[in-house]
Image (cartoon, grey):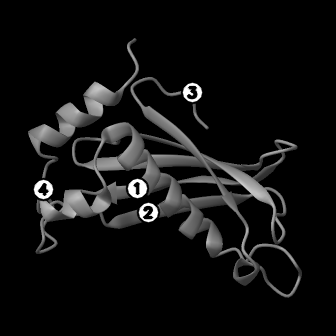
Amino acid sequence: MPAETGCVRDQMQLRVRYGETDQMGTFYNARALDWFECGRSELMRNRLGMSYAELEDKGVLLPLVEAHLNFQGRARYDDLLKVESSVAFLGRARLRFDVEITHCESGKPVVSGYTVHAFTDRDGRPMRPPEWFVKMLKDAMPAA
């Protein structure tokens, strides 16, 4: 995960479910984006104090506009994984969530990458982040 200043971090654990594996016995590659979403959702809830649903209730949406995945290792059914996520502003109206997923016990990497999300209103029109969101993110950042 990039050693950025001005970012908010969180971590969680998840266990690979049987339905997330493929015929080769490892996690199916598309599951990585689902796991990234778990990390984003929990970061927002735990560190920013607001769920995605609450954000949407306020008329702010964060559609995905870019994703990058780097597959580094295997994860099999029932493996316990650690999902480490961070978020920071990317420009004036986007958020970048960086994610690293590793095996809990060994620390071996599974997948890392990032997603970029734009701020839009309910009609999908781009917007600047509301001041209350900017304050919420800044308040969650560690002291420099």
Q: Residue furthest top?
A: 144
Q: Earlier in the sequence, mark 2 or mark 1?
A: 2
Pointer 3: what residue?
Answer: 3
Q: Position of residue 118 (x, y in %)?
A: 28, 58
Q: Earlier in the sequence, mark 4 or mark 2?
A: 2
Circle 3: is it few (<14), some (14-19), or many (20+) Cα within 10 Å?
A: few
Report if the CB atoms under discs 2 and 1 are less than 8 Å apart: yes
Circle 2: is it few (<14), some (14-19), or many (20+) Cα within 10 Å?
A: few
Q: Earlier in the sequence, mark 3 or mark 1?
A: 3
Helix, strand or loop status at disc 3: loop
Pointer 1: what residue?
Answer: 116
Q: Is residue 128 above or below residue 73?
A: above
Please, what is the three-letter code of the amino acid marked with disc 1? Val
Helix, strand or loop status at disc 1: strand
Residue drawn at x 88%, y 79% as measured from the top left: 25
Helix, strand or loop status at disc 4: loop
Label disc, if present, on residue 142 of the rendered structure? none
Residue drawn at x 32%, y 40% as measured from the top left: 48
Pointer 4: what residue?
Answer: 127
Q: Is residue 22 above or below residue 60?
A: below
Please, what is the three-letter code of the amino acid marked with disc 2? Glu
- Residue in the foreground of this view, choosing between 94 and 87: 87
Residue drawn at x 37%, y 47% as measured from the top left: 44
Label disc, if present, on residue 66 of the rendered structure? 2
Quarter of the image where one finds residue 131? top left
Report if the CB atoms under discs 2 and 3 are less than 8 Å apart: no
In the figure, is residue 63 to the left or right of 9? left
Circle 4: is it few (<14), some (14-19), or many (20+) Cα within 10 Å?
A: some
